[in-house]
Image: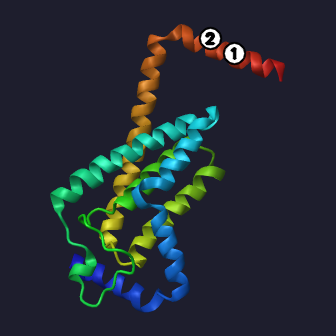
Amino acid sequence: MILNFDAMILLWIQETLRNPVCDSIFKFITHLGDNGYFWIGLSLILCIFKKTRKAGIFALVALLFSVIVNNALLKNIIGRLRPYEIIAGLECIIKHATDASFPSGHTGSSFAAATAYLLKLPKKISIPTLVMAFLISLSRLYVGIHYPTDVIAGAISGVALGILACLIGEFVIKKWQEKHPKKVKVEETKTEDVKAED
């Protein structure tokens, strides 16, 4: 029943939505998620600035969690074949993958990073990244390299791992502050002095 659900959606996308213009657009979008380069690059940029550094670090941790859980563990344990290997008539319009299908690693990493941004950045910055995560996930269906259930599982795991990374990060920061109260007070004093000068 699950395979029939997946096949129905993928074949509908192929027969109804695909066209040369959308093919080019979605190929570009899907490759943004390759190896998490887009999210890693954005997170490293956020790490440069003090106001966004926490979000950048937490997102990098979330990306690491996603690689471990989704790519290293679940893909190898479940070993699901790619949809173009199973569904008759389905054509994958990008280079075929060599790893297993479930869950979608692109989706997992995208939602892991976007969730960390959503929790730690202003909405005007985080909402566009959430939209990008959604588009990358949708692109995996459009190009025919993932089942819908792969993408759903990747999104769920990504959100969970993004939340987990933030919780662990805040816990570590809290423990560090408890062990180094003098340094925290110095930083707070510096911050107050800067505000007073402004």
Residue 141 pos. (x, y %): 39, 75
Tell whether label 1 touches label 2 (CB within 8 Å): yes
Q: Point out residue 42 in the picture as x, y percentages from the top left corner.
A: 55, 49
Nearest to the observer: residue 183 or residue 175: 183
Label 2: how many residues lie within 10 Å, few (<14), some (14-19) or many (20+)?
A: few
Residue 43 vs 198, above or below: the answer is below
Give the residue at x 39% y 76%: 94
Relative depth, front residue between 195 and 92: 92
Taking the spot 40% from the left edge, 77% from the top edge, the residue there is: 143
Compared with residue 40, is residue 104 higher up or lower down, i.e. above or below? below
How far across and down, in percent of the image, does residue 52 sit? 60, 38
Residue 190 appears in the rendering: yes
Residue 183 is situated, as x and y percent measured from the top left of the image, at 55, 11
Q: Which residue is mark 2?
A: 186
Residue 146 in the figure: left or right of residue 55: left
- Which image quadrant is residue 81 in? bottom left
Q: Quadrant of residue 195?
A: top right
Residue annotated with mark 1: 190
Q: Can the viewer see residue 118 in this picture?
A: no
Element on which disc 1 rests: helix
Q: Quadrant of residue 111?
A: bottom left
- Eyeballing the image, is 86 above or below 177? below
Secondary element at tag 2: helix
- The disc label shown at residue 114, or none: none
In this image, 189 relative to 97: left or right?
right
Q: What's the CA distance linking mark 2 and mark 1?
A: 6 Å
Residue drawn at 46 percent across, 49 percent down = 113
Residue type, numbered disc 1:
Lys
Query: Is 197 left or right of 191, judged from the image as shown?
Result: right
Q: Residue at x 20, y 79 (%)?
A: 1
